[in-house]
Amino acid sequence: MHVVVNAAMSVDGKLASHRREQLAISGPEDFDRVDRIRAAADGVIVGVGTVVADDPHLTLDVTDRRVQRQRHGRPGNPARVVADSTARTPLDARILDDEATTYLLVSEQTSEERRTKLADAGAEVIVVGDDRVDLAAGIDRLADEGIERLMIEGGGELIFSAFDAGLVDELSVFVGSQLIGGRDAPTLADGDGFTEEFPVLTLDDIEQLDDGVVLKYTVEA
Ligand SMILES: NC(=O)c1ccc[n+]([C@@H]2O[C@H](COP(=O)([O-])OP(=O)(O)OC[C@H]3O[C@@H](n4cnc5c(N)ncnc54)[C@H](O)[C@@H]3O)[C@@H](O)[C@H]2O)c1
Ligand SMILES: Nc1nc(=O)c(N)c(NC[C@H](O)[C@H](O)[C@H](O)COP(=O)(O)O)[nH]1
């Protein structure tokens, strides 16, 4: 499985304000770039924090010719995936509509009743992990479903976990030109933070887009 992380952050490294409201850091050119990364992926995963905050749809703008080229030979949208240990995804979340397959990775903490409700609402529920979703195990299960390239779209808790588990192959981050501030605002990598053995990235490319810059890295094995 090849795993790529993409996110947009302010110049001070925040993914959103401390209110966690939907906030466009990217401009139109960067959102087009995000669409092309989605189009090149077989699956797009977010944490349930992002589902609750943004109610994202995670589908493609199929009117974009470059997106169509990326999907060459692969019909439809990539699968949508949510890491959701306690099955908090709302039953009316936009990611549960029928425009793409949606996998919910949940832990053993979820009741059969809740799993059934989410399955009835359109989700494919996969149980991985006792208290919390075991991301590595989840990725193995997604590979069994034919997902070979996975895009992680955030937020900061999920991105940290993916780095912590050594699962990330590539990172691209758009750095916008606003300053958001706030000690409680989500950042690119939250979680508990590293204290030793910090992941080391190699800078491969820099591109100016909109009023910001895209930094592309590969992650050392
Ligand atoms: N600017 C961007 O590119 C961007 C992208 C995505 C989200 N966001 C913003 O980020 C915020 C949400 O981020 P967040 O960090 O609060 O939530 P998140 O989306 O990272 O979700 C975290 C939640 O996922 C669940 N989870 C299940 N298994 C997990 C695991 N193994 N590791 C980590 N989490 C796991 C937990 O309930 C956890 O609380 C929102 O404000 C959203 O707008 C911004
Ligand atoms: N690349 C990027 N730039 C941003 O400025 C921003 N706010 C997000 N945020 C990611 C978050 O997951 C959003 O909710 C989805 O980008 C929405 O996705 P949809 O359009 O609903 O498919 N992502």
Image (spheres, helix red, strand yellow):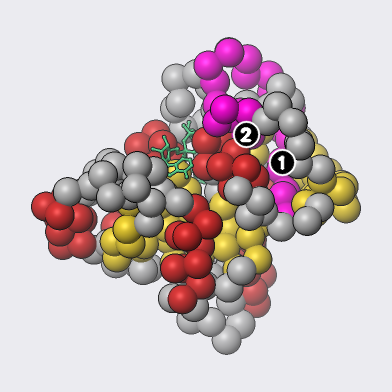
Q: Where is residue 4 in the image (x, y as percent from the top left)?
A: 66, 57
Q: Is residue 25 left or right of residue 11?
A: left
Please name the residue shown 33% across and 62% down the image: 126
**Would you call the spot at circle 1 few (<14 residues within 10 Å), some (14-19), or many (20 or more)?**
many
Query: Main structural element of the magenta stretch: helix, strand or loop?
Result: loop
Q: Which amino acid does label 1 sit on?
A: Phe
User: Which residue carries the number 2 mark?
Assistant: 189
Q: Which amino acid does label 2 sit on?
A: Ala
Specify whether residue 108 is painted magenta: no
Q: Is residue 185 left or right of residue 106?
A: right
Q: Is mark 1 within 8 Å of ligand 2?
A: yes
Q: Does the residue labelled 2 lie within 8 Å of ligand 1?
A: no
The magenta segment: 170-193
Q: In the orientation shown, which residue stands out farthest toward the top?
A: 182
Please name the residue shown 62% across and 42% down the image: 164
Given residues 176 and 62, the one toward you in this image is 176
Q: Where is residue 221 in the image (x, y as percent from the top left)?
A: 78, 56
